[in-house]
Image (cartoon, coloured by chain):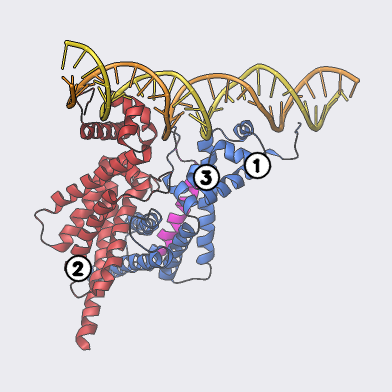
Chain colours: A red, B blue, C orange, D yellow
Amino acid sequence: MARRSDHTRDELRQMALDAARAIVKSEGVQGLTTRAVARRMGYTVGTLYLIFHNLDDLIFAVNAQTVADMRAGMEKATAGLQDPADRLKAISSSYLAFALQHPNLWRLAFEHQSSGAEPIPESITRETDQVLEQVLDGLRRLLPTLDEDALPTLAAAFWSGIHGVCHLTLTDTLKIAKAQSAHTVLDCQVNAFLGGLMPAAARQAAERGSN
Amino acid sequence: MARRSDHTRDELRQMALDAARAIVKSEGVQGLTTRAVARRMGYTVGTLYLIFHNLDDLIFAVNAQTVADMRAGMEKATAGLQDPADRLKAISSSYLAFALQHPNLWRLAFEHQSSGAEPIPESITRETDQVLEQVLDGLRRLLPTLDEDALPTLAAAFWSGIHGVCHLTLTDTLKIAKAQSAHTVLDCQVNAFLGGLMPAAARQAAERGSN
DNA sequence: ACAATAATTGAACATTGTTCAGTTTTATAC
DNA sequence: GTATAAAACTGAACAATGTTCAATTATTGT
C-alpha cells in the first residue's frame, strides 16, 4: 500500500463529510458542489470519486450523519424522563430544535431526491426507524389498552404531525415568526393529538371492560 | 406590434407552464430544464427568457398553478358540506389525494428552494393563505367557544399535521404502503387532533360558564 | 416597397457532475 | 540502494446545465 498524503480513506471520507456539512450550513444546498467540497478538503474533484460513487452518495452520507445527530439529540432530551407523555414531548421539541438550528441540513435530509433510482441507504432508514420506534414506545406506554396493531399507524401520524410543523416552518409556508411561534404551534399540535388519544383509549378500555 | 408565430405572450406563457407541468409529472423535478421546456413548446431557450425572468420564475408560476389547483380541489370537496368537522376532513383528504396523484408537482411546490433570495411571490402565498383560512374557518365553527387569538396557531397546527402526512408519504420516510395506508394515517391524525380539541373546548367553555 | 419594430434564434459563456489516462508518491523485493 | 509494482492523486476533458445577447427573421405601419 502507498499513499501520498497522510490521510487514510476513512479520514478523507470524514473530511469530505465535514466539508459538505460546513458548506450546506453556510451556503445552503445550492452551494453543495463536488468542486466546492474538494476545494475545502484541499483535494481535487477526482479524489472525491475515489471515496464516493457520486454526489448522491455523498449527500446520503451527510444525511445519515444528520439523522444520527438528530436521534442523539432526542436520546439526550429524553434521558431522564419516565412519563411517556413527557418523553413524546421531549422528542418532538428536540426534533423541532434541530430543524431550527440546522435548517439546511434538515432540508437536505428530508427533501433530497436522488437522481438515480437508488433507494435510500440502510444507514439512513436505520436511524429513522429508531426514531419511529421511540415514538411507538412512548405511545404504547401512554396507551397500554390500545391494540398493538393500531400503534404503527398512530406513531406514523404522531411523527407526521411534528414533521409537518418543522417542514412548514422551514419552508416559511405558514407565516410563523420563526423560533418561538414554531414551538407554540408544535405544542398545540402535540397537545391536541395526545389529548385526542386519551379519551379514545379510555373509551376502548371501557368497551373492553363491558364485554 | 409584430409576431412571427400566432402565439401571444399569454399563450406562450401558458404553453410553457403546460410543458413544464408535463415534464415534472412524467420525469420528476430533475427533468425540468429550460431546454426541455423550450423543446416541448416548439421554441428555443431564448424565447423562454422573454416570458420568464429565469427558471425560478417559471417554477414559481408552475407552483402557483399547482396550489390553485389544489385549492380548487378542496373547494369542490367541501362544496355540499355544512358540518365543520366534515369540512376539515374533506380538506385534509383532498390535500392528500392531490399529493398522491401529483407527487412531483406537490414536491416542487413545497420543497423548491429559489436560488436567488427572491421571496415567494404573492400569487402563491395568496392561495396558501386561503387554504389556511378555510382551515381556520372550520375550526372556528367547530369550536365556537375558543378564543379568536388561539385560532391561527390551531389552524397552523392542523395544517401541519396533514401536510406532514403528505410529505412523509411522498418522501417514503415512513414505510407506508402508498395510497390506502396514507389515508389511514391521515384519518388517525385528523381524528386524534380533532378529538383532542373537543374536550379542551368543552373544558374552556365550562370554565367560562363557572366564572 | 420600405423602413421600423417586434419576435425569435442560436451561438457563446460559466458552471455543473463525471470520467480516466496520466503523473506522482509510497511500499516492497532484490 | 535501485527497480518495480501498486496505490494515490491530479487535472484535462466531456456533456449538460442556466443565462445572455448580437444577429436574424417576420410582421406592421406608412
Q: Position of residue A193 (x, y in %)?
A: 28, 64
**Is residue A73 left or right of B29 when viewed as pictured?**
left
* Prevalent SS, magenta region: helix
Q: Secondary structure at mark 2?
A: helix
**Circle 2 residue:** A140
**Is residue A56 left or right of B21 when viewed as pictured?**
left
Bounds of the magenta segment: B119-138
Crowding at mark 2 (Cα within 10 Å: few <14, some 14-19, many 20+): many
Answer with mark 3 or mark 1, whichever residue precedes in sequence: 1
Residue at the outermost left position? A80
Name the chain letter of the residue that bears numbered label 2: A
B112 above or below B97?
A: above
Q: Residue at x 27, y 72 (%)?
A: A149
Crowding at mark 1 (Cα within 10 Å: few <14, some 14-19, many 20+): many
Q: Position of residue A91 (x, y in %)?
A: 20, 54
Q: Position of residue B93 (x, y in %)?
A: 44, 64
Q: Amino acid at mark 1?
A: Met
A187 above or below D1?
A: below
**In which image quadrant can residue A43 be found?**
top left
